[in-house]
Image (cartoon, rainbow, N blue to C red):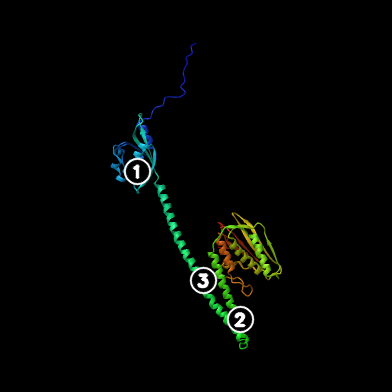
Amino acid sequence: MTTKSVSANPAGPPAVAAGPEQLQELIDNTNAVIYMRDLNGRYMVVNREYERLFHLRREEVIGRTDHDLFSAEIADEFRANDLRAVSGGPVNVEEVAPGADGPHTYLTVKFPLIDSAGTAYAVCGISTDITARKRAEEQVQQLNLDLEERVRHRTAELEASARELDAFAYSVSHDLRAPLRSLHGFSEILLEDYDGKLDDQGSQYLRRIQANVARMGQLIDDLLRLSKVTRAGLSREHVDIGEQAREIVSDLRGADPGRRVETVIADALVTTGDPRLIRLALQNLLANAWKFTGKREQAAISVGVVGQPGSQVFFVRDNGAGFDMQYAEKLFDPFQRLHPAAEFEGSGIGLAIVQRILSRHGGRIWAEAEPGKGCTFFFTFAAEGSDRSNGHE
């Protein structure tokens, strides 16, 4: 039996080179603009995307140059980029060509075609329309310029307002104090020099004048404090709130040694902010707690922290007079008081100062209270994404 051997061809059938029609079909089915020009700048090949964008049939383009199709400025740029590719190899450039809705920007790759002798005989170009991206970048740039201009304008307004506030503060601290000093001085003279000539009612009127002069002076001082808090420079440091609170409570005990107040201050109460302003905020909160627990036989004040998603919420809690939550909206407004002056002294400026300090730190403050059952002030040093129904910004 004779066996005939059959040789296998693992490589498969021989490859067939693509013809001009297949290559044209290939470039016609791309989103990029593809073209070929000879060394004299005459078009040899264009694809369907070229026809669509420039509203020209390829029969109208082949054999012509860019100077036949575009303005001299645009054609000169195209020609210069072609020659760069011929002399130096592939180039990546941005080119601008006319479009139906205005100039379009193309990201173009150009490279020379080399013959067997190593000589360039044509230039190919592949251009991708990046107009939408460029226009978006220009819009962003313009928006940034507009924003910078608005910021400069707003900064100038704020600087002018700051100067006006400085002038107002100077006027308050000097011009308004002079007549107050005069009122106080003359009333004091009347009380001393006319002591035997004034009856009890006249003396009482003069003392009421002096008391109101003192109150007016205190209001001026409070206004100046509020103004300084709003305009003071802000530093950022690690601040031990617990340590500050203990120092403030010690000062309050020293100024009022007859009081018995139980205080609980948690450990590790640390935040980042301006130490001086944070201490001023704590001073006002703890002084309020000290004051409004004044009628409690077993007064209690605590300082601590509760966990909240994304931030720490500190608190100052007391078991003092408390207040009705329906008036909580007024709590942080300057000179708003929820208790009669005869019952608890004060100007109503302290909590407004606290609110401004926390706002400058990007934080907030709110309160929970009940009449006769004390109050808790919660506060943060970082802005939170959610609001609280019982808060006050």
What's under tag 1, amino acid-wise? Leu
- Disc marking residue 99: none
Label 2: which secondary element: helix
Mark positioned earlier in the residue sequence (1 or 2) = 1
Binning the other alpha carbons within 10 Å of mark 1 as few (below 14), some (14 to 19) or many (20 upward) gives some
Q: Position of residue 20 (x, y in %)?
A: 35, 31
Frontmost residue, 193 versus 247 = 193
| Relative to 360, residue 51 above or below | above
Frontmost residue, 19 versus 175 = 175
Q: Position of residue 7 (x, y in %)?
A: 46, 18
| Side of 65 relative to 4 (left or right) | left
The residue pinned by badge 1 equals: 53
What's under tag 2, amino acid-wise? Arg
| Side of 390 relative to 99 (left or right) | right
Disc 3 and disc 1: Cα gap in Å? 69 Å
Residue, far top: 1
Which numbered mark, 1 or 2, is in the foreground of this view?
2
The residue pinned by badge 2 equals: 207
The residue pinned by badge 3 equals: 170
| Side of 302 relative to 101 (left or right) | right
Mark positioned earlier in the residue sequence (3 or 1) = 1
Residue 285 in which image quadrant: bottom right
Frontmost residue, 32 versus 158 = 158
Which residue is drawn at the image coordinates 42% and 47% (left, top)? 133
Residue 142 visible (yes or no): yes
Binning the other alpha carbons within 10 Å of mark 3 as few (below 14), some (14 to 19) or many (20 upward) gives few
Which residue is drawn at the image coordinates 45% and 63% (left, top)? 156
